[in-house]
Structure formats: structure tokens, C-alpha cells
Image (spheres, rainbow, N blue to C red):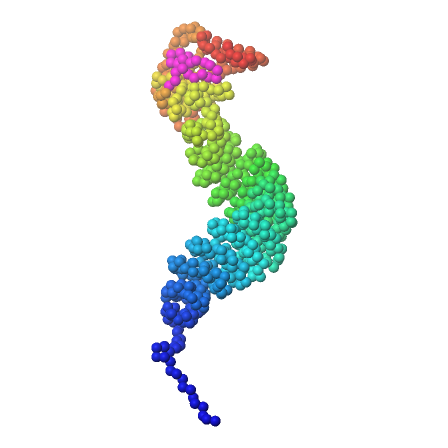
Amino acid sequence: MGKKIKKEVEPPPKDVFDPLTIESKKAATVVLMLKSPEEDILAKACEAIYKFALKGEENKATLLELGAVEPLTKLLTHEDKIVRRNAMMIFGILASNSDVKKLLRELEVMSSVIAQLSPEEEVVIHEFASLCLANMSVEYTGKVQIFEHGGLEPLIRLLSSPDPDVKKNSIECIYNLVQDFQCRTTLQELNAIPPILELLKSEYPIIQLLALKTLGVITCDKEARTTLKDNQGLDHLTKILETKELNDLHVEALAVIANCLEDMDTMVLMQQSGSLKKVLSFAENSTIPDIQKNAAKAITKAAYDPENRKVFHEQEVEKCLVTLLGSDSDGTKIAASQAISAMCENLSCKEFFNTQGIPQIVQLLKSDNEEVREAAALALANLTTSSPANANAAAEADAIDPLINILSSKRDGAVANAATVLTNMAIQEPLRAIIQNHEIMRALLGPLHSTNTVVQSTAALTVAATACDVESRNELKNCGGLEPLIELLHSKNDEVRRHASWAIMVCAGDELMAVELCRLGALDILEEINRSLSRKNKFSEAAYNKLLNNNLSLKYSQTGYLSSSNIISDGFYDYGRINPGTKLLPLKELCLQELNDQRAILLVNNKSDISPPPSMEDKSSDVGYGRSISSSSSLRRASKEKANFRFSAGFGSPTEEKSEPASGRNTVLSRGATKEKGARKGKGKKEEEKVKEEEEVLAVPKLTESPEKEWYPPPDPEFCLYVLEVIKTILPIVNIKEQIEVLAKHWLIKSGLAAAWCVVSTAEGGTR
């Protein structure tokens, strides 16, 4: 055999670059390789960058600084699948960095990323493309771009992917997207609920949790709830609650059920299937605070519907809520109190809580947590509304003290709720007395000064409910509560104005307080309100009339008449007509003015004994009253010369209507009735001398009032005798018609005005 001849290796072409193996230890070098035209180098560079990015946030920031993002975006559309896959893997990791997300939005790569979700692409590409979108969807701008580029539909399709990572990333992205209403609407159109329900069967808890969270958001819409019910979604949710091993999903499952219970059809369906009873029992027996809280929230949501409340009552939901009130979790206590507030719109529920719920709620009023106190006060407010029995039960549970303490709370809701409960209690007189003994008026001072209209309204209403006696009104006055109450009349809120008017109407129940309210400007404000068609209300009109009816001197001066129900008492004085807006000075100030030529001011005073009695030695008639006081004879003379009056039913207005301001009037004080003319004719010189002496007394200059001496209106003994004489004459007569006739004749004789006319009511309702 001959020798084998060794074949010579042909040298490589001269125009081909010899292979070069490079080992790089710098990220910057690898980033430069991203611009290489060789697919193998691009693939290896991307793989190296991916591993580098996985190591931490600092490496992601480094890659951003090195300018790796922009060349990588171009590789997303590369022809080679490996290059495209590796580039997509990098973006899935990098997109968790906020600065990278911002740059990706600016480079508008969303369409390229969404394109990687097509069915033709590998599962790995689906995984990292969905991961990138999940990271991008955290921010609102990212949500908008994903939605506008049609990313929702391929994401829903990927919910059925065999790869759990793809499912997890897709449902997470969808959960972020459905926070926006427009995305929820589109999701419903794409029939996404069936594949989401399928995820509840996943063996991976994170996927189940994200699916439940997504359902919790989308079932806020009625159409989604209907779709869920039609696809047996309630069965899936109930099974989760029944499975103890899935206790980490119970909270979210209850949140979805809470939304579904808002629909009456769903409520009935769950009641018929027994699911509702299971849910309530589950909530009552659970030891997890969040589960109890969500169960109470579910009841609250559903209980706003009257039919749902009936169903709940049939399922004895009240027992469950009372149990939840005893939870150690403040959140559960708040949710249970709110549920009771909603449930007690049902009368039967309200009656149930009378003995089994109110004592526990009252205890919550003493909590250190302000939110708990507010929720408890809200529950009591609804429980005691139109329910005297519940109001009594709250009082028996010692609710008054903590309620008054809550009036000083910093939470407006708590203050308003507490004031409402106190108002509901004060409707009953025994409870009102107890509330008044707790210095309620002083406690209401803060709420009356509040800037919150709800607090202002409820505080004014509480004043109206509690200021029903003189002592309470004086307490309100002494603690400075009248001023802020009157200030509320200026409110632009209709309810505040209405309740403030109501409170003022109640406070004007006695003459002294009515005078004080007028002095503080309440009458002027009410008059202004009643002139406005948009601002006036029935209470403002009633308050205005009440103020006038308890200040008859002012009413007579303003209107010129008194009604048949207005009873004149001691201290009434007739100043004469005043113009609108003119202040009527108090009697004391008028008495201290200088004499002038204006019309006399007539005073009615039936008190015969005035303490301290006047002394001739210290001339108390001058000092005590600040001016000389005329006797009956001087009054008769003055009344004849300076004023003519016509008499009619219910006090006719004076003929002489003055428009001058209050100052500078001739203040002549009298018993309000003149002596007959015949009595004056037979007096002779003694009477003339007496009149002369009185005129000299009138001429005495006014002395300064002593600050130590209390001022009293001047007495009128002759008027007192006249009243006694009339009483003795009239009372023995039994027939009312005869009483009226005798009184009229008596008046005509005493007045000496034979030509005057008087309207006399007869038993037949006529006049003569």
C-alpha cells in the first residue's frame, strides 16, 4: 500500500475577518456591542445585560446612564427571534425602574412591546412582554398608552396561557388598568370575566389573589356583577370562603361578595342557596379582623337597599353585627357601627338594637379612637331618630356624658352625630332636663362657632331642642351663645339658616330674652331675610313674629297694632310709630333723656309697690328715674294737649305717627288711661295749684343716675286702683257678652270720651 497523502488546509480568504473571542468586564463595552450588526454578538450582549440588570436597581440605573435603552428598543423589532427575545427580557426587568419607564414612554415603544404578545411569539417573550406592561401600567400615563395601543385584548387572551408567569403578569397588568373607568367598560365588552374566574382555580395563590382583586374592582359596575352571577362566580367565591386553606383569600373574596350583594337579585339568589347564611356565619365566627371588617362593609353596602334590609333581618344579621361590635379591632368596630347605621332604617332592626346593641355602642363613645367615636355616634343618631324607646335606652346606658364630651371633638362628623343624638333625646322632657343639667349650652358654644355647615346646622337644632325654659336660655345667654347663633342667620346654607331661625324662635319664648335678641340685631336680620324670596323660610317668619310678640312695645311701634292674642303686661310702653330700621330704645334710656316738645311716651305699670320705695328726702323721683315723673293730673293735661288717640279692637295705631329718631323724645310716664273730663271741672284752685307744682317739678334739671341704685319703672297707684275696680265689676258677671258690654261702658265713663267709638265683639260674632 502506498503512503497516504496529507490534504493541505486551504487558507481563509483574505477579505474575511478571523474570529475573535473577547472577554469584557465592563458594562459600557457590552452596551457598545448593542450596535453590532452581528446577530450572535447582539444575542450574547443582550444576555449579558439581562444578567447584569437582574442584580439590582443600581445596575438598572447604570444601564440607563450608559445609554443602553435606546439601542435596545430597536432590537425589539429585530428579525432574529433570539435577539428579539433577549431584548424583551431586558425590558421586562428594566421597566420596574421609574426613570426607565419615563424614557420608554418618551420613546413610544408601547406598540412594539404589545406586538410581542401575538400568539406566534414564544412563551418566554409573552412572559417578559407582559411583565414590562405590568410595570408600565403602575403609572397613569402608562395605563393610557397601553389602552390606546390596544393592549387590553391580547392581555385578556394571555389569561388562558399555559404558563403561570404569563397569567400572573397579565392579570396584574389588567388589575392596574381597570382602576380607570374606561378600561373597565372595555373589559366588559371583551368578555373578560370568564377567564378571570378560571384563574380562581389556579394552584398559585398570587394568581388567585390578583384575580379576586380585579373582580373586586370591576364588580363595582352592575353589568359586571350580572355577568359574574351568570357565570356561577358566586359559587366560586363561596367555595373559597368554605376552604380554610385559602384563608389568605377570604378578605378579597368578601370584598367581591360585598359588591354583588348590592343587587337584590343576587341577594335573593344567595338567600335561596344558603350562601348568605354561610357568609354571615363565617363573618361572625372568624378571628381575622380584616375578614370581619369586610363582612361588615358588605352588609353596609347592601343595606342601603330597603329590600336587602328585609332579607338581612330575616337572616338575623343584627346578631352578627352585635358580635362584631365586641371585636378588638377598631376597624371592625367602625365597620359594624356603620352597618348598624344602615340597617336601622328598618324599623324591626331598630327595635332589635334597643336592648342588644345600644349598650355596646354607648361604650364605643368612650373609645380613645376618634373614628370609632364618630361611627358609634352615627349609629346612635340613626337609632334614636323617631324612636323614643331607643333614646331612653341610650340615656339609661349613660350616653349623655360621652355625647357632650364628643361635642368638643376635632372631627366634624363626630360633633354633628353627637348633636343629633342629643337633639333626639331632648324631644322627651325628662331626658331634656338631664341634658340641661350637663351644661349643654356651654358645650354647644364650640359647634356654634364651627365653619362646617353640617355642624352649624345640628348645633342650632340642638339649641332649639334644649332651650325650652328660661334657665336654659339664660345659660345660653350667659355663656355667649346668642351671638354666634344670631350670626348663623347670615349663612348661605338654607338648612343652617332654617335651624338658626328655629332656635331663635325657641329662645324668644320669654320677653327678656326676646328683648336681648332684638338688641343683638336678630330682628333686623330676620326682617332682611324675610324680604328675600329665596332666603326666607317658615321658621324665619315664625321667629320674626315670635320676637315681636314677646316685645309688644316694639311690635306696637313698628306695626301700629296688637293682635287679640297679645297680652300687655307691666312695662309696656307706647313710643309712637317708628320707621323701619329705627332702633327702639329701652324704657330706662328713654326715661333718662332730656325733656322736649315731642309726643309723650305712655307706660303701663300695674305694680303698686316698688322696692326700694321712693323717698321725698333724697328725691328719688328725680334721681332714681333720671327725670321727674308726672302724676295722673299732669298726664291728663299732657294727653289732652299733645296727643289724640282713636280706640279700636286690639289697640289701634296712634293718630300721631312720628318718624323722628328715638333720642330727644318727651318721656312722660303714665298709667295709660286719662281721667274723665267731668272730674277735672270740679277741682277748682287746688287742682290748678297742684298742676302748677307738678309743672315746676318737671322743670327740675335731670340728675345723674346713681350707679349703686337699681332702676325701677315709676309706679302708677291710680291705675292699679282702676284695674282692681274693673276686676271687681266684671268678674261677678257670668255672661261673656254682658262682661264685654259692662267693660265698654266702664271704659267710656272713665275716659270721658262720649264721642269715641269702640268695637265690641258680641256672642253672635257681630259688632256694634
On screen, residue 193 above or below 86? above
Q: Residue at x 58, y 61 (%)?
A: 203
Q: Residue at x 39, y 21 (%)?
A: 578
Q: Is residue 547 magenta?
A: no
x, y percent for residue 587: 41, 23
Residue 753 vs residue 263, the one in the foreground: 263
Residue 209 vs residue 144, the one in the foreground: 144
x, y percent for residue 148: 44, 53
Range drawn in magenta: 633-658
Count every numbered label the image shows and give the total. Answer: 0
Q: Quadrant of residue 684?
A: top left
x, y percent for residue 459: 49, 37
Name the dominant secondary structure of the magenta segment: loop
Q: Quadrant of residue 102?
A: bottom left
x, y percent for residue 561: 45, 19
| Residue 133 in sight here | yes
| Residue 330 in sight here | no
Q: Residue furthest front?
A: 1
On screen, residue 93 above or below 214? below
On screen, residue 518 above or below 598? below
Q: Quadrant of residue 596?
A: top left
Q: Is residue 645 magenta?
A: yes
Q: Residue at x 34, y 77 (%)?
A: 15
Q: Residue at x 48, y 34 (%)?
A: 499
Q: Residue furthest bottom?
A: 1
Residue 75 vs residue 669, the one in the foreground: 75
